[in-house]
Image: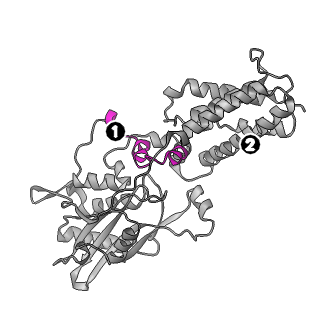
Amino acid sequence: FLPIAANSQKVAKEEVYLLTCGPGTEIYSVYGHSALRVVIPEKNSDTVYNWGVFDFSTPNFAWRFARGKLDYSLGVSSYEGFLREYYMEKRWVVSQKINLDSAQTAKLFVLLEENLKPENINYRYDFFYDDCSTRIRDLLEKSVGDDLDYPPDISTNELPTFRDLISKYEKGYVWRRAGIDLLIGTGGDKKASFRDRMFLPVEMKDGLSQTNIRREGKMIPLLANPALVLDFEPPVVKTNMLTGPFFIFGLLLIICIGLTGYFRGKKANNIIDTVIFSLFSILSVLMIFFNLFTDHQQLKSNLNIIWLSPFVILCLLSLVLKKDWRIWFRIVFFLSVGFLAFLGFLPQDINNSFVPLIGILIVRSSVRSEFSWNPLTIPYLTQL
């Protein structure tokens, strides 16, 4: 069934392999995957330990994931069954033997048994700090101990951020990248050290391939040379600038400016602003939720809440209730202008696609603010 020789690979003693799987096209698979293969000849056992198991049928799955309360699990499967899944998904798989001695291997086996206990088999997933890759990294660190020797890291100024690292895997998925950039806060802009970068499977493969073990006064590689088990080309995603978020949002900004200049009646402007501020209020609710009511630490301290502030919701209420609450529109205006003015100084990388959206808020909130300098202002616009 599987066109590979490695599926029937024989070994003489217990051996452990790092399996690195290429990216898929689904949002949960685009960053790749890592697993441990454990071969025990005397038990005729060829098993894969996989810390990336979750169940879509979990009650309130989406809500629990949004709240950061979704548990992932350690799954155990046969090596052939594991490969079959990736063969069907047409994702490449690389295998590397981990050069552990008998004592280190025995310690790893004890740790794996500990992980399989009912009280430990589930864990609270954290994309940056506790996922399918970091679990393996941590087990290897505990198994090898002080004899594990990471190479020196690059200078601090050259370190990538967590956002930089994940953006490499989002090339082509421009809308998804914009959504991720909208939701990830300042935690995504922290510098990722050599060890930190191992939250991504391919980064861990490359990092551990540069790592050594001290043994009997010598330094030996932690990982053997990679063997390609499944060979598939990575997915290619074509991008079209005309369908990307920056172009679409820019077009909406132009349309907004045109409508603002064309429609001078109060009724038409109320309809336009009710639609616009309803949409922005949805984004504002997301900002409030992910800043205050989720356990996902990387979504907190999100500076996008400055232009998508709760005041946007108050603006919508003033429209719905037909109240002349221009103060909220003025606050939204100054927050949006200030956000753009200091964009280059913020400790958070802001996706360029959001600039036209902020422009829409500036245009419509300035009209509603009834500034004397604004020729587009219509007095008492909130009244019908």
- Residue 325 in the image: above or below residue 145: above
Q: Which mark sits nearer the N-terminus, 2 or 1?
A: 1
Residue type, label 1: Leu
Q: Is residue 375 left or right of residue 284?
A: right
Residue 33 screen position, x and y as percent: 38, 61
| Distance in Å between CA atoms under marks 2 and 1 | 40 Å
Q: Residue at x 65, y 35 (%)?
A: 252
Residue 229 screen position, x and y as percent: 27, 67
Where does the C terminus fall, quadrant-wise? top right
Residue that badge 1 annotates: 159
Q: Is residue 177 left or right of residue 310?
A: left
| Viewer-closest of 379 and 184 | 379
- Residue 96 in the image: above or below residue 236: below
Where disc 1 sits, the SS reads loop
Marks 2 and 1 in Cβ contact (< 8 Å): no
Residue type, label 2: Ser
| Viewer-closest of 131 and 82 | 82
Q: Is residue 312 left or right of residue 56?
A: right
Residue 119 screen position, x and y as percent: 47, 72
Asked whether residue 303 is in view, the answer is no
Q: Residue at x 75, y 27 (%)?
A: 260
| Viewer-closest of 24 and 308 | 24
Where disc 2 sits, the SS reads helix
| Viewer-closest of 193 and 359 | 359
Residue 313 screen position, x and y as percent: 74, 40
Where does the magenta region start and end?
A: 156-179
Which circle, 2 or 1, is nearer the viewer?
Answer: 2
Q: Which mark is residue 278?
A: 2
Main SS of residues in magenta: helix
Asked whether residue 163 is in view, the answer is yes
